[in-house]
Image (cartoon, rainbow, N blue to C red):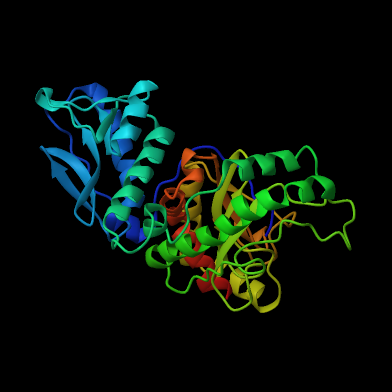
Amino acid sequence: MSPVVAGPGGGAPTGPAARRSAPRRRTDPNTGPGTAAAQDLFWDLAGPILADPAVQRSTMMGLPCLRYDGRFFGCLDRRTGALLVKLPAPRVAQLITTGQGEAFAPAGRVFREWVAIPTPDRGRWQTLLAEARALAADAGSPADAGSPADAGSGGFAGFGQAGLDFLAGLAHDNTKRYFDAHRRIYTQQLLEPAKALIAALGEQLQRRICAQLRAEPRVGGSLFRIANDLRFTPDKPAYKTHLDLAFWQGSAGPRTDPALILRITGTHIHLGTGVPALTGHALDRYRTALRDPRRAGDLDTQVAALQAAGAELSEPTRRRPPPGTDAAGPAARFAARDGFYLVQTHPLPGTATTPALVTWAADQLTPFGPTHQWLVHNTT
């Protein structure tokens, strides 16, 4: 996998699927101007969530809400601009005690399993909505499906914190001695959870983006080796300081075909799509598509929207576009790349150690679906 690029911020869905699922925003005459930003943020976050057919828009006590198979999990209090999420009572108490949330008590009645998050904060709201949604999905699983973590997330229970700390440690001590001393932590708290994440996240991406996406929970499949091959590049460090996952589409494999990608470090998570440097017939198809004004325009529109949301495009591989490319048109910047990666970077969310990471990651990757499909249709 080509090195990912970093970009701040949060994504929003693009393309026809997003336009179908994104709700219309309505200005509530009973709210003040201070809640307008909260309403905009709520529906921005709801857009990719509603791409899941199991999620429906609804109302609760006259307030706009989100439901998973009929179970409420998120709501916006238009009177105060607070996000309302349904979580277990101990978790609600924790959020209130730490000052992150407030009790939800309409008409003086306290709802012990609902918490109000009063200040619009994209990262916090997004994380809590993902957590609440995962719990709502678990609540509808069969009683014999196992633990809640297994039931709603394909067996993924979260990465171990010691495993994430191990990745950060590799950045300071990238030696076989350090790796061997922590091998059990790597295996139990990173490697095996990563395989479970691939299986669970792959199911969601196949449902949301394309059923032909490949998700193989094994090293050499969707999971890249953590050890670097030093036979031809002995100057490299012995180990990567991250986990790389890929969900690809095609017959050649994740190192060649277009893929949705996910990189996890001890402090950040990178998500996006792309294809490595193309050659031969695949490169010819790519350049032919870029000479078509409609197809080049579609790609440029999709990428521009993702860049506006914080994604970054990998560096050009050529000093100038090849002959036959309109140097002033939208295709020029892509023709200067024989392949590209478009990636967004987030601080590692609190959900990384919980089953909710599956849905959180699916929500972040869904907006990259149209660009991924463009690459599939025009290179494979």
The answer to whether residue 185 is left or right of residue 157 is: right
The answer to whether residue 161 is left or right of residue 75 is: right
Q: Specify the quadrant that holds the N terminus.
A: bottom right
On the image, the x and y values in percent for residue 15 come to 38, 58
Q: Give residue 281's quadrant in the image.
A: bottom right
On the image, the x and y values in percent for residue 84 come to 26, 34
Q: Specify the quadrant that holds the C terminus.
A: bottom right
Q: Is residue 39 above or below residue 336?
A: above
Q: Residue at x 32, y 58 (%)?
A: 52
The answer to whether residue 66 is left or right of residue 184 is: left
Q: Nearer the viewer, residue 97 or 254?
A: 97
Q: Residue at x 39, y 40 (%)?
A: 126
Q: Give residue 195's quadrant in the image.
A: bottom right
Q: Is residue 178 above or below residue 98?
A: below
Q: Is residue 328 above or below residue 42?
A: below
Q: Is residue 329 visible?
A: no
On the image, the x and y values in percent for residue 304 come to 49, 49
Q: Is residue 292 above or below residue 172?
A: below
Q: Nearer the viewer, residue 356 or 244?
A: 356
Give the number of callouts: 0
On the image, the x and y values in percent for residue 330 come to 54, 55
